[in-house]
Image (cartoon, rainbow, N blue to C red):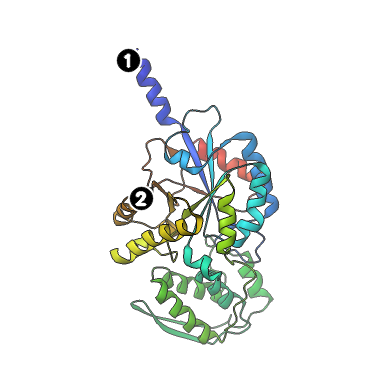
Amino acid sequence: MFHEILARIRKIRQRKALILMYHQVCERNCDPWELAVHPNHFYDQLEYLKKNFDVVPVSAIAEGRVFHPAKKAIAITFDDGFRDNYTNAAPLLDWHELPATFYVATTALQQQNLYWWDALQEIIFHRDMLPINFQMPIGQSLVQFTFRSDRMLNSRVMNQIRAWNYSLPMFNERIALYMLLWHHIKPLTFSHQNQIMRHIQDWAGCWDVYRSQGLTMSVRELQMLGENPLFSIGAHSVNHAMLAQQDPADQAFEVRESKRQLERWLGKPVNGFAYPYGNYNEVTKALLKETGFRYAVSTESKPATVEDDPFALPRMQVKNWCVYEFASKLNEMVDE
């Protein structure tokens, strides 16, 4: 009898669930971080999930309630609050009657603006001509760059940019400059990021940034999502801050104010948090617990188990895969 109980416990511990991380459901002409899934692919992915998995709210995985069914459990999450989550993703989820959680940064929703990395792409990747020299203090560094060949946007450069993503070598100087600036801007505070982006716009002579892709949803659209019983809303900080790089006071503001603001908008508790960039430390986790969050999701790509820390739940990023590649990736992850 004792051995049977041990075997049962061991079997439960070995059971896995998956948490999927989406960002956008749209067609993008430039997607270096592979964040966008085409609506046709998303539809097919949902069809596959409905037939082959027990699709559950992420909170059920966080609370350890799903490590027993015959079908493996899977949860659908979205980060950043892009408007296409409301216009493209939510109707397809609703059609398939599948639950999902949307993690949003509150400032982005209030401003309905581009995140800084999308604005940077528009400037560096799409400006017809850039100045030959770049020199600017960013954080503790003096960042310098000189163009030799790619400051004029031509068909070769544009095609290279469209074909490029973060896992590939940098094909041209515009990509190299983008990545140089991205690494320096990412850990800054929100106000410093905004200041640097204004300086970069001035340097490029680009004051009207193209905004058809990457806009966030409005507060009202978020509220309408929250009214659907299939959907839940989670916090993603106030300013999409790289939390472990902020001092404790700034971290406390990002955590506490995001929960307060979302609960005011939605009129109900917000229990889940997604770490921007997957970046956090022990201070962050302690603040989440003190503030009343019940779980948090990261960007570590592996299956979830019943033994995982509920404040460091792993997620698998979904890319613009056809259904066959999607199925292969899921099965590969489940069988790890």
Above or below — where is 227 with respect to 246?
above
Residue 43 - label: none
Task: Look at mark 2 in the image and give the residue it sits on.
Answer: 292
Q: What crowding class fits label 1: few (fewer than 14 Cα within 10 Å), some (14-19), or many (20 or more)?
A: few
SS label for mark 2: loop
Residue 233 image position (x, y, % from top left): 51, 52
Residue 174 location (% of width, % of height) = 55, 76
Q: Which residue is tagged 1?
A: 2
Q: Position of residue 235 (x, y in %)?
A: 45, 56
Quarter of the view holding residue 242: bottom left
Give the residue at x 59% y 55%: 224
* Kind of residue at badge 2: Gly
The answer for how far apart the CA atoms under marks 2 and 1 are is 38 Å
What percent of the width, then of the height, locates residue 44? 68, 45
Q: Nearer the viewer, residue 187 or 218?
A: 218
Residue in view at x 42 percent, y 45 percent = 313
Dot placed on the residue nearer the N-terminal end, 2 or 1? 1
Vertical arrangement, residue 218 with respect to residue 309, above or below: below
